[in-house]
Amino acid sequence: MPRPITARIHPEAVRHNVGLIKQMTPTSRVWTVVKANAYGHGIERIYPALAQADGIALLDLDEAVRVRELGWTKPILLLEGIFEPVDVELADNHRLTVAVHCNEQLQLLAAARPRRPIDIMLKMNSGMNRLGFRPQVFRDAWERASALPSVGSVGLMNHFATADDGAIDWQLDEFDAATQGMPGEQSLSNSAGVLWHPRAHRDWVRPGTILYGASPTGVARDVADFGLRAAMTLTSRIIGVQTLAPQETVGYGRTFRADQPMRIGVVACGYADGYPRHAPSGTPIAVDGVRTRIVGRVSMDMLTVDLTPCPQAAIGSTVELWGDQVKVDEVAEASGTIGYELMCALARRVPVEVTGAAGATTAAAQTPQTACTTN
Ligand SMILES: *Cc1c(COP(=O)(O)O)cnc(C)c1O
């Protein structure tokens, strides 16, 4: 029998979330972002749930090819664009739309002879200072891109640095001023823009994390009112029980000390499964459907929980690490990170099941690379 840990992926939750996003952005089209192997969920597993989306956005050419091979005929956007000449060929063969954020990428396109002009999204750096043309040179880049015979449509793209925790006007005003009168479809908003900045919805939105039911802020209560559903449930079981006497400790470093007699459950899940080692005592977890807390340090293959609120729990009891009862963002917040990182870091050794439309669980079509293979 394998270790009792399992990740369940729920395509129906993704389908539901896509529907919510469409309702929130009624005049925009939706690029669903599935980079990093669909934020750790597996592109192939959630692909059927994206039928209502207007496009798919990702980073890796091999993921783009996988999506085409699954039968996707609508647009695919490469969020970081191309890196070398052969990429233009692949973009041509697979009809990919490519982000263009620097002169080097314009030169690659200028040197290429694709069979069909490549559609691009010209990216502005309006203050994030990662990728993109600065507002002062954006019009010049746009004119050069538009003049290239190898380039088809030229869209206008931007990425916000603070859409999750404040105002975006400092970037949006820059973008609008620099693109005044410029034709082209606009795409500015990630998940946080979708939820909180309708002014920035424009022609195409690019939600990622909310597709999977996680919060752009990393704080579960910030999205509690939107009705998003969790696309991943990580469960395991209790494999050992200890009763501590007062002043006894549990685990490495003796970081948790019982102040009264206390039952402790040992759970088959550790940091080698993708559970954060930084999760401190007090991080929420559910045992037999009852919320409780982890106590002591997370070790490689195990962690320990306080069974005081669930005295009936015993070896074999079901544990939810994250999912419906405990949001991935709650675990992330306690651990000083965001749900994105935990979803993407689900370890390859964790067996994955896909829940079917009827709620039944089916074994996933397992291929070695279907665990999260990218960062
Ligand atoms: C990852 C990414 C997104 C999606 O971001 P979320 O915060 O997950 O919604 C959108 N646009 C770009 C350019 C990205 O890299």
Image (cartoon, grey):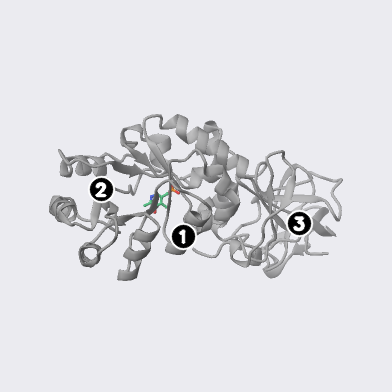
Q: Which residue is mark 3?
A: 258
Give coordinates of residue 64: x percent, y percent: 45, 58
Proximity of marks 1 and 3: CB atoms separated by less than 8 Å: no
Q: Which residue is mark 2?
A: 153
Q: Amino acid at mark 2?
A: Ser
Give the answer, above or below, for where 104 lies relative to 58: below
Give coordinates of residue 25: x percent, y percent: 41, 32
Find residue 327 and name its label: none
Q: Amino acid at mark 1?
A: Val
Q: State the separation of the CA atoms marked 2 and 1.
A: 21 Å
Of 289 and 278, the residue lying toward us? 289
Question: In this view, which residue lies farthest toward the front?
Answer: 115
Q: Secondary structure at mark 2?
A: strand
Q: Amino acid at mark 3?
A: Ala
- Say which of marks 2 and 3 sits in front: 2
- Say which of marks 1 and 3 sits in front: 1
First of labels 1, 3 by sequence position:
1
Q: Which residue is mark 1?
A: 65
